[in-house]
Image (spheres, helix red, strand yellow):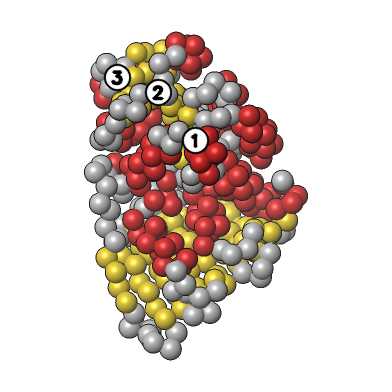
Amino acid sequence: MSMDEVRYGIVGAGMMGQEHIANISHLPGARVVALADPHPGSLDAASALAPSAERFSDHRGLLDAGGCDAVVIATPNLTHAAVLDDVIGTGVHVLVEKPLCTTVDDCRRVLQAAGGHDALVWVGLEYRYMAPFARLIDEVRAGAAGRVRMASLREHRFPFLPKVDDWNRFAANTGGTLVEKCCHFFDLMNLVMPGRPERVFASGSQMVNHLDESYAGRTPDIIDSAYVIVDYDDGARGLLDLCMFAEATHDQQEFAVMGDAGKVEARVPSDVVHIGRRGVHDIGDVETVHAPSTAAYEGLHHGSSFVEHQHFLEAVLTLDTEARRASTQASLEAGLTSVAMGAAGIRSIDAGRPVPLAEVV
């Protein structure tokens, strides 16, 4: 592999594939050399961003042609497992979009197979790199909140966007909203909690979005709102508040962490972090830190995807295999756990009861 330039292949050239191309184009020492997608329109749009890249209608053709040091998998969720089956073992570094897979069983199978893969397998959980959230995580790890006892995440946002062939309108294709979308938030919870997730209790439904849509006679079945409580094995708990018909809002994401010494809170896109210490601050009187993105490319995720690619490229350029594996930040284990928490939440909604994580894992 040339140390001067890492050659990327993009598998899946739709909206997220194009977002990855744009990020990589702003990354020194990286170049997109190949594109794979069965949809001609997506390939054309991606080629406009990477005009010198070779085009393939199938990921196997891209892999067989060689010439890539790393691939980004940005195909529909339900295809991740099958694409990873073909990529793992090739020696190519992999960044796979979230969720890792749509089912826990597929995640476990991928994790087992990757044990013999000498290259990176990295999950695209880029929210951990949003500047305010990254600052919050650093503050919490430095002890600003003390021992963490509660974490609260709120996403109030717009409905799911249109995708090619409307694949994201059905839970069978996405894994369900708590897997597809909320794996980000379960991952953030796990980054600040000292314990491990043990039990999930959720209430959610499809209340507003997509009810007037029909695809081949089928109405979309993806939930658009939920409250999810996660109990951790040390007695701490997390809460997710999701509403996907709340685009008329100021801050789309809010992340708060409370411990025995204080509270740290981050807001996006206000890009502020509030730090309150018990015995020092009171209500309305806290330290406020501005934490805007400094990424070279903002893109669709407030610069977090670019920062993710910076870390991924740095790890790719690490020549020692064990050191490279140790540098993996969004690991397969993290990807599996975030999917399992979403799957437990979906089962909890269906069954109307708390679901132990062991029940789905």
User: Tag 1: residue type?
Assistant: Asp
Rendered image quadrant of residue 333 = top right
Mark-to-mark CA distance, 3 and 2: 24 Å
Q: Which residue is mark 1?
A: 320
The residue positioned 58% from the left and 23% from the top of the image is 89
Ranked by sequence position, the earlier of labels 1 and 2 is 2
User: Tag 2: residue type?
Assistant: Met
Relative to residue 218, is residue 258 depicted above or below?
A: below
Q: Residue 107, percent across and down?
A: 63, 37
Relative to residue 202, is residue 5 depicted above or below?
A: above
The residue positioned 57% from the left and 20% from the top of the image is 86
The residue positioned 47% from the left and 66% from the top of the image is 141
Q: Residue 111, percent across and down?
A: 63, 36
| Tag 3 near tag 2, CB within 8 Å | no
Ranked by sequence position, the earlier of labels 3 and 1 is 3
Q: Residues within 10 Å of mark 2 (few under 14, many from 20)?
A: few
Q: Residue 45, percent across and down?
A: 30, 22
Q: Residue 5, percent across and down?
A: 31, 26
Q: Residue furthest right?
A: 359
Rendered image quadrant of residue 12 = top left
Give the quadrant of the N terminus. top left
Q: Which residue is mark 2?
A: 1
Q: Which residue is mark 3?
A: 47
